[in-house]
């Protein structure tokens, strides 16, 4: 077969969670816009939710085409998604793998054999499938390079990490600022979700079999870490922020229906006045924390848009807002279950973002020029908060005090109020906004024609083309 770009077929496989689907789908759109045939895949259960929420369907993007195909993880679509995380992960690795191989074979039968697979390292078995079928494989790392470096150093025992009895110990790794206990992903220190820790560490299992590690970051943001890690692990190509490089915003990968009314509500608010609050797709706040946060939002007197999302099974229960809160909030704020976050962050009414600092949310606010109140809960969110505040200078970190049930750390209502004030009107607010705008412009330059991430995408497409010839 001729190796014209239009004959190249890239198959992306995403771990079935929103924080993974978004960057993979953005990369899929970006590659399709280069004239390639691109198929995005994840499990049927999640595919069904995507179709219900956003009417996901195949589409032409520029000269290329984006298709969707899903594989079974062994559960019926209308069956509760999983018994528990560990069982479900196992099922994904066994039933999912078989169904994924069938999906690949179907592509050959229809005359469009797969030229390259891109998986995210949460599904390391996809790399084995690619090797068995002799298809080149690349991975997309969906967190920061700093976090890549931390996990890599831990996994390869290149540094000693503090345990819960060594909270005063500081972790120093090449190219990173000194990290205190609360800046380190707590999967490595406190281990809140054991099955997730296992997946996190298994990410490096097959990384050396990939011909390239793409990351949703950009050179100007993490240059030194990218250089150091490319030398000691696999060659790393930053291609982000993918959220900025995709032109077809109407193709979305939400697995819950967004309340678009909140955009009209934002239209009715004054410029630069609204606090946007979201903890992503999987975080569950304790009832004490919900209480303090809701009281703090009301106390601040600032209009707010708050996403209150039920976390997946095994990660927390349905959040109960304090009694009377909805009535008190009437006219002051809006509470939704899911919103079009990209558009919210781009809205001129939004003044700051109270975020759990998932990597997608971190990249989206950083590159939208929106100041942040960092409110991390677990995992890489701790490290992202450290970088957003101390390295990129785009906000302040909410301090926790041990006032919750059994002394659990909680951000109090006074602290919520203080943070909102500091980041929007305090002594450093101007400096913070200046930094936020600087990073937004740097990101725009990275994805513009000739920019660092744009070049890396072009080089990546050249690599696929070369390997297919
Ligand atoms: C998870 C982990 O929690 C996070 O630490 C890791 O970095 C990635 O995987 P999640 O908690 O879902 O991610 O957060 P995040 O990475 O911020 O991704 C959430 C995505 O959902 C973002 O792209 C955001 O734009 C989108 N979103 C969120 C919406 O579109 N609407 C909403 O209402 C909330």
Image: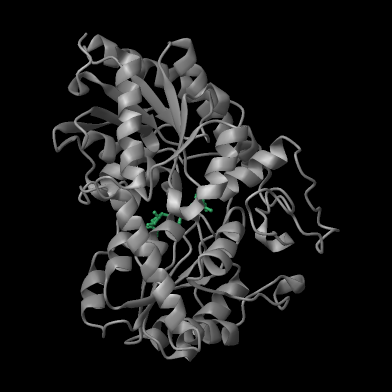
Viewport quadrant of the C terminus: top left
* Residue 126 appears in the figure: yes
Decide which of 68, 248 is in the foreground and name it.
248
Whether 463 is drawn above or below 24: the answer is above
Regarding ligand 1, which quadrant of the image does it lie in? bottom left
Decide which of 444, 24 is in the foreground and name it.
444
Whether 291 is drawn above or below 74: the answer is below
Q: Position of residue 196 (x, y in %)?
A: 62, 43
Q: Image check: 442 left or right of 184?
A: left
**Number of dots carrying numbers:** 0
Residue that appears at 57% across and 84% down: 413
Residue that appears at 42% across and 57% down: 363
Decide which of 155, 254 is in the foreground and name it.
155
Q: Image check: 330 left or right of 297?
A: left
Q: Position of residue 6 (x, y in %)?
A: 18, 23
Whether 195 is drawn above or below 299: the answer is above
* Residue 312 appears in the figure: no
Whether 158 is drawn above or below 322: the answer is above
Q: Image check: 408 left or right of 247?
A: right
Residue that appears at 65% across and 39% down: 152
């Amino acid at each position: 077969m001729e190796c014209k770009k239009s004959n190249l077929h890239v198959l992306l496989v995403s771990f079935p969670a929103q924080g993974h689907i978004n960057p993979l789908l953005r990369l899929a759109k970006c590659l399709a816009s280069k004239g390639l045939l691109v198929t995005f895949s994840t499990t049927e259960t999640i595919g069904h939710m995507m179709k219900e929420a956003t009417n996901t369907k195949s589409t032409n993007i520029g000269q290329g085409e984006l298709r969707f195909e899903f594989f079974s993880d062994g559960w019926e679509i209308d069956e509760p998604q999983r018994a528990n995380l560990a069982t479900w992960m196992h099922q994904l690795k066994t039933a999912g793998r078989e169904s994924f191989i069938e999906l690949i074979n179907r592509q050959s039968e229809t005359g469009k054999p797969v030229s390259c697979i891109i998986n995210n390292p949460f599904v390391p078995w996809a790399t084995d499938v690619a090797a068995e079928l002799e298809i080149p494989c690349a991975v997309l790392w969906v967190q920061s390079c700093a976090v890549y470096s931390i996990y890599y150093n831990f996994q390869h025992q290149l540094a000693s990490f503090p345990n819960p009895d060594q909270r005063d110990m500081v972790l120093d790794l090449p190219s990173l600022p000194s990290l205190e206990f609360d800046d380190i992903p707590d999967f490595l220190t406190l281990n809140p979700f054991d099955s997730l820790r296992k997946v996190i560490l298994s990410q490096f299992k097959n990384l050396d079999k990939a011909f390239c590690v793409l990351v949703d970051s950009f050179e100007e943001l993490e240059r030194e870490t990218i250089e150091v890690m490319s030398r000691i692990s696999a060659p790393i190509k930053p291609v982000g922020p993918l959220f900025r490089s995709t032109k077809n915003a109407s193709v979305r990968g939400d697995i819950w229906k967004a309340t678009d009314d909140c955009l009209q509500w934002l239209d009715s608010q004054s410029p630069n006045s609204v606090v946007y609050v979201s903890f992503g797709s999987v975080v569950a706040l304790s009832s004490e924390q919900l209480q303090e946060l809701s009281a703090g939002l009301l106390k601040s007197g600032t209009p707010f848009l708050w996403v209150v999302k039920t976390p997946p099974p095994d990660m927390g229960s349905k959040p109960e807002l304090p009694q009377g809160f909805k009535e008190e909030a009437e006219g002051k704020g809006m509470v939704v279950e899911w919103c079009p976050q990209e558009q919210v962050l781009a809205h001129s009414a939004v003044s700051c973002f109270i975020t759990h600092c998932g990597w997608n949310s971190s990249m989206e606010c950083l590159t939208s020029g929106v100041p942040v109140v960092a409110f991390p809960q677990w995992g890489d969110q701790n490290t992202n908060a450290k970088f957003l505040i101390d390295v990129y200078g785009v906000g302040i970190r909410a301090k926790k005090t041990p006032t919750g049930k059994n002394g659990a750390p909680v951000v109090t209502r006074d602290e919520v109020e203080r943070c909102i004030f500091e980041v929007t009107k305090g002594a450093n607010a101007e400096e913070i906004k200046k930094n936020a705008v600087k990073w937004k412009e740097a990101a725009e330059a990275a994805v513009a024609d000739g920019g660092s991430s744009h070049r890396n995408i072009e080089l990546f497409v050249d690599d696929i083309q070369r390997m297919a010839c």
